[in-house]
Image (cartoon, grey):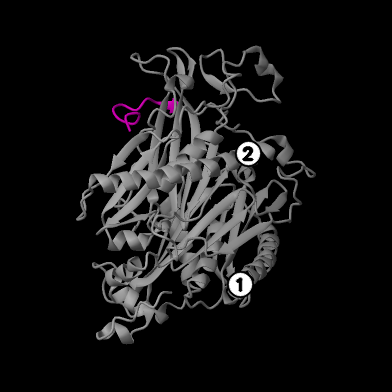
Amino acid sequence: MAAKGGAAPATYSPSPTTFKKKRPPIFTDVDWVRPDGRDFHQCRPAFLRTGAVNAASGSAYAEFGNTKVIVSIFGPRESKKAMMYSDTGRLNCNVTYTTFATPVRGQASSDNKEISSQLHKSLEGAIMLDTFPKTTVDVFALVLESGGCDLPVVISCASLALADAGIMMFDLVAAVSVSCLGKNLVIDPVSEEENYQDGSLMITCLPSRNEVTQLTITGEWSSPKIHEAMELCLDACSKLGKIMRSCLKESASTSQE
Amino acid sequence: MVGSANGATDLSSEMEVDAFRRLFPLRFHERHLLESVRPDARSLGKARETSLALGAVASADGSALAKIGCTTMLAAIKMEVMTPSKEAPDEGCVAIDFHMPPICSPIVRPGRPAEAAPVVSKHSGMIDLKELSLVSGKAAWMAYLDIYCLDADGALFDAALLAAAAAFSHLQIPVVSLNDDGRIVVVSKENGEKAKNKPVNEEKRKLKLRSIPFALTCILHKNYILADPTAEEESIMDTLITIVLDTSCQLVSLYKPGGPALAYESVLQDCIALSRQRVKELQKILNEAILDMDVD
């Protein structure tokens, strides 16, 4: 502890952190190669597991490339004392990052509120809140490593954890984002691509009901591009939904044995 | 499960085991202790299954994931550069933070400091701070060690210390050089242009760990000693004692934060004996994890 006491000496990371402001021309070319060698319309391989945290009512771990996330669900449990009576349940979402999630230590701790509220918005439409009146379900996410597309991974992982906790939902929530880089649309971008993107579009949807709970578009887009990107996302969401479903089935069948 | 519901006359005889466990937790556990067994079928002095994975975090310079039963700890080290203080110009620094994120336990809520957060003590001379020096008086390493509890199921300190020690064993110090502005930069293999500044730490890629501390937490209850308690046991029988021994089984620290049960000398001796066995187990697990990593 002595190391921390007193005036903590200012430190800096020796790695070349200030990435170039100008994006390398390679990203604007028509036939560049993505940093991890994927096709533009190819998602990263997804690894999903439920039951990662024993102390929680339900939990899930998701790994998409270098993006690694754990989500725990607690409840339904008593709401905080200060809360007014409510005959529908409440959803409380919180996303935190580890200090080593980003290349530079402690970089991503500022905008948690924003991510937490987006997580809340994308989940609340899918959950049957009237099945747990007067109580709160807590959704806590921890981003172990940030490798791009953190929010969509957190959302998908959270809905899997909710299912694991036995919270009633209309459907699983699958989330996918697309980045616009010059003329190209790349699905499921890594951090490096996100840093240079012109615009981004994220859809969270209920794949088997074909309903969208949240759609966010930022940056520069033209309407035909938006169309194309939405098609891409919805298609990927339905595939992701299948993977999530099979993960749930797998854990249910192993627990029965 | 042991027939815990054969207390002849009272209510407990006609109750299901799970209900009895929740309503009369202390009697439930004491009934087990009489038979020298614990609810998870362990004997009293036995620790839970322990596993260790090195290099769990790709974005860190050293990392480890430790699991003791369900308790899971993730430790990662990031190396940054600092200017050493005048008093100790050739010493680096180690900064340790322990985090209990809300995911790990139902009693931690965001915004509230975790009550059970153990502070991982200063490393008992495990690291020679002089090894963290780069350029005397100008630059030294600051090793930021962050330990995250991913799943809290008792014996948090033991798991945190194991994860921390393993993360330091895994640590690979990046090769750096002093550039013309007096800043330390990483030498990357692909840029040949930086090679004109000679690396300052080519031979110091690994820390020499002098002796590694290992911990064992025990519960004292009546005249029983329960090694490596689960969260349930900790919440019911609340006298804990934590013993830290180093690799040569020398006592590093002994911590008994109050509690209703008092520790006699013989009890302490017994706890230390249990810790000795545990140190051997843990050392074996750590060595195997390091070997596994070297093979890959």
State the residue in front, B112 or B164: B164
Picture quarter with the N terminus of chain B = bottom left
Residue holding disc 1: A254
Tell me: B292 left or right of B214: right
Q: Amino acid at mark 2?
A: Leu
- A52 relative to A6, above or below: below
Magenta segment, which residues?
A1-11
Structural crowding at the residue carrying mark 1, measured as other residues with C-alpha within 10 Å and reported as few (<14), some (14–19) or many (≥20):
few
Q: Nearer the viewer, residue B218 or B90?
A: B218
- Outermost residue on the front side: it is B266
Task: List the single residue furthest toward the right.
Answer: A31
Identity of the residue drawn at 51% across and 38% down: B167
Q: Where is residue A168 drawn, in percent x and y? A: 48, 78
Q: Is residue B143 above or below residue A254?
A: above
What is the CA distance from the residue labelled 2 to the residue labelled 1? 32 Å
- State the residue position of label 2: B291
Q: Quadrant of residue A63?
A: bottom right
